[in-house]
Amino acid sequence: MILCITPNPAIDRTLILPNLTLGDVHRAEQVIVAAGGKGLNVARAIETLGGRSLCMGFLGGHTGHLFVDLAQDVGLAGFWTWTDSETRTCTILVAQNGDGTVINETGVPVPSSAWKRLKRDVRRNISATSLVCVCGSLPHHSSPEDWYGLLKLLVVSKKQVWVDTSGRALDAALALPGICIKVNKTEIGEALGFEVKNLASAKRALNMIRDRGVSACLITLGAAGALLATPDGNWYVRGPRVRVVSTVGSGDSLLGGFVSALDQGREWSAALRDGVAAGTANALSAGGGRFTLREFEKIRKQVIVQPW
C-alpha cells in the first residue's frame, strides 16, 4: 500500500466549457466535483492501475466532510487529521479552445499543533505502507520546521519517499539527504536559479540535485518527455503525441503510475514507462487522475525509454 500525503487538499470543481473568453458570461456543459489535491490525483492513478493507497492530510469544516464523502465514493481510503480550518475549494476551467485553467484558493492557516497531530497519525499508519508520496503546496503560513519535521520522519522510517512540491517546500526537501524528488522543469528551475527548458539544462539540474544527496529525481519536461536519475542508472522517456483535453493532474498521474509500478517490484525504466503512460492518458480527459486502463495500456506500448 502506498501512502499519499496531501498537506493542502481541496474540493476540486471542474467546469467543462465550450470555450473560455475573459470578461464573457459562460454556461458550463458539465461539472465534476471531486476530492482534490495532488496526492488525491496520485492515489486515483494508483487505484486505477490495481494498486492500493491510503490518503492523509489536513481537513476541516463542512467542506472537509464533503471531501471525505467524495473520496469514499470513488473508493479512496483516508486517515485524516482534522483542524478548525475550512478545507479550501479550487476551480478548474476546461474549454475546447485551450488547456485547463486552474484557480487555486490559498487555503487557511494550519497551526503547529495540527502538524504534530499529522506526524502522530503518520506514525500510526506508516508501518502498513511500502512507499510514500508527499504532494502539493503547504497550508497557509505553515512553518518550514513543521514541514521539514514531517519529511524527516518519513525518511527515518526507511520508506522510499517521493516529494512533489515547489517553492520553499521544495527547497526544504532538497536539503534532506535520502529523499526522492519529482518536479517539473519550472519548479526545479526556480529552486536552482536557472531556466530548465531542454534536455541539456535538465541534465545539469539533475547533476546539481544529486550533489545534494537526493536519492533519486524525476524531472518532467512536458511534451519533450522526462528524465530520471537513480543510484542504478539514468533514463530519458518520451510519450506519444495525443490530442490533449486537459493536462491538469497529468504530472500527478505520472507519479501515481511510476510509484505503483515500483511498488509492484518493477525496475526503474519499466516504472518510468508506466508513469509516462499514465500521465499521457490523463491528458485525454478532464479531471486529475482520471483515465482508463485501456487508454493506459494502448499508450504504454508507444512510450520510448532509453538510458542517458
Image: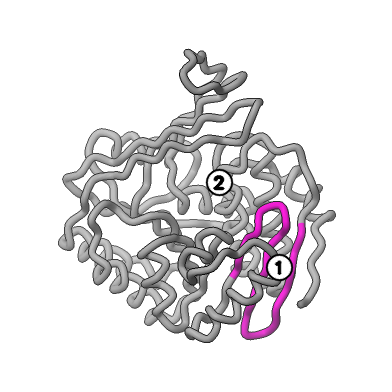
- At a point 56% along the width and 17% down the height, the residue shown is 29
Taking 68 as reference, is 219 left or right? right
Model colouring:
one colour
Location of residue 230 (image quadrant): bottom right
Q: CA distance from mark 1 to mark 2?
A: 23 Å
**Magenta part of the chain:** 218-238
> N-terminal of the two: label 1 or label 2?
1
Does the segment drawn in magenta span residue 57? no
Q: Which is nearer the eye, 34 or 73?
A: 34
Pinpoint residue 124: horizontal percent, then vertical percent: 30, 67
- At a point 44% along the width and 60% down the height, the residue shown is 165
Residue 249's mark?
Answer: 2
Compared with 26, 70 (above or below) is: below
Q: Quadrant of the C terminus?
A: bottom right
Read off the residue under disc 1. 199
Compared with 277, 181 (above or below) is: below
The secondary structure type at the circle numbered 2 is loop
Compared with 99, 107 (above or below) is: below
